Amino acid sequence: MIIPISEPSLEGNEKKYLMETVASSWISSAGEFVSKFEHSFSDYCGVKHGVATANGTVALHLALVALGIGKGDEVVVPNLTFAATINSVLYTGATPVIVDIEQESWCISPEEIEKAITKKTKAIIPVHLFGQPCDMERICDIANKYNLKIVEDCAQAHGAEYLGSKVGSFGDINCFSFYGNKIVTTGEGGMCVTNDTELNDKMRILKDHGMSKTKRYYHEVVGFNYRMTNMQSAIGAAQMERIDEMLMWRKELEKAYKSRFSEIQHLQLQKDDLANRKKVTWLISALVPAKKRNNCVQKLGEAGFDTRVFFYPLSSMSIYKSYVFSDKISTAIAEQGINFPTIRRLSNENIDDMAKILRDCL
């Protein structure tokens, strides 16, 4: 038996709405479900506008371009994140500045952000890693102090909160991914959310080839084809009808892991009791001793359990080394991190089996 680390939860109206798009023949980027998904998702985040995109990476790029980030500018990013975060900065011609993370949250360190700021710094991309919110109060204070833009990377944290507000509601433009392993999925897909009507209008033009909204096929700027299809949006709209339910079963699954993993020596599950932060469960994440991590992964795999190690820190890859400002904590955390299967059909017996393997390994 193979237990995957992740699989989409498609038990609602996903098929029904998808077949409606096929029956209507509106399967490309026009159709009722695009705006329906944009409105339901932005409303959920507590933000005025949502701009659906082809994926989360282009959402980040679109946000940076709309904010005027380009050559000669610097953008601060965390060292422990998926490469899309830094690549989106490089696409604009700007220079990324890689900084370290907090020991407890695994998210970008506000102290390191402030140390790294120069006269060229124009923006910060805080990443809410593995469902854990960043310290947005301090990050917003820094941004206000130095007149910087904030683009939240919320790809792994749909529904997480800081001080009672949803992630995605703090920055100038904030970006989500709906890849197949995300809490809300459209297969591939992304979204930019913002409270700024001018930025919303600008992104809508940029994502549609730079075409005028009043004069069809007249291009006002050099734009991109970053549109989401009506078919993808149909799945997203159905997912939003069940987001609270999906977050609940994920939280219950994390509790089941905790009850069975709590007494395993040398294993530390991701913290969910940090002040002002309401974490959501994306993947079940934990730290184990670095020298034993790969053996744990191997033994779990042999027993049919798919796991995933943490992202390689950006500073460890030669193409990003020249952008590093600080990386000590993130390098150590990355070597210890492991993610466990986070799927609805996982049984308590499955978790017991994994716990036994981990006890033997650790």
Image (spheres, rainbow, N blue to C red):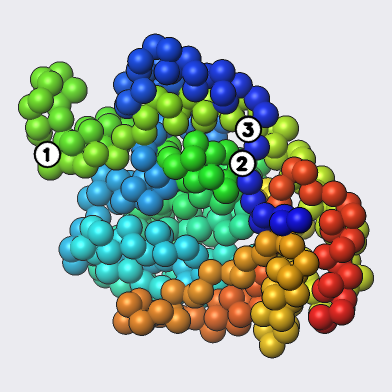
Spatial separation of the CA atoms under disc 1 and disc 2: 37 Å
Query: Between residues 273 and 163, which one lies in front from this camera angle?
Result: 273
Q: Quadrant of residue 166?
A: top right
Q: Where is residue 188 in the image (x, y as percent from the top left)?
A: 44, 42
Residue 353 higher or lower than 331, as above or below: above
Which of these two is toward me, 161 or 118? 161
* Residue 179 higher or lower than 317, as above or below: above
The residue carrying pointer 1 sits among few (fewer than 14), some (14 to 19) or many (20 or more) residues within 10 Å by Cα, namely few
As drawn, the label of residue 60 is none
Q: Residue at x 40, y 79 (%)?
A: 317
Residue type at numbered disc 2: Pro
Question: Which amino acid lies under the numbered mark 3 shown in the image of this protein?
Answer: Leu
* Tag of residue 221: 1
Q: Do the residues labelled 1 and 3 touch (CB within 8 Å)?
A: no
The answer to which image quadrant residue 158 occupies is top right
Secondary structure, mark 3, is: loop
Regarding mark 1 in the picture, which secondary structure is present there? Answer: loop
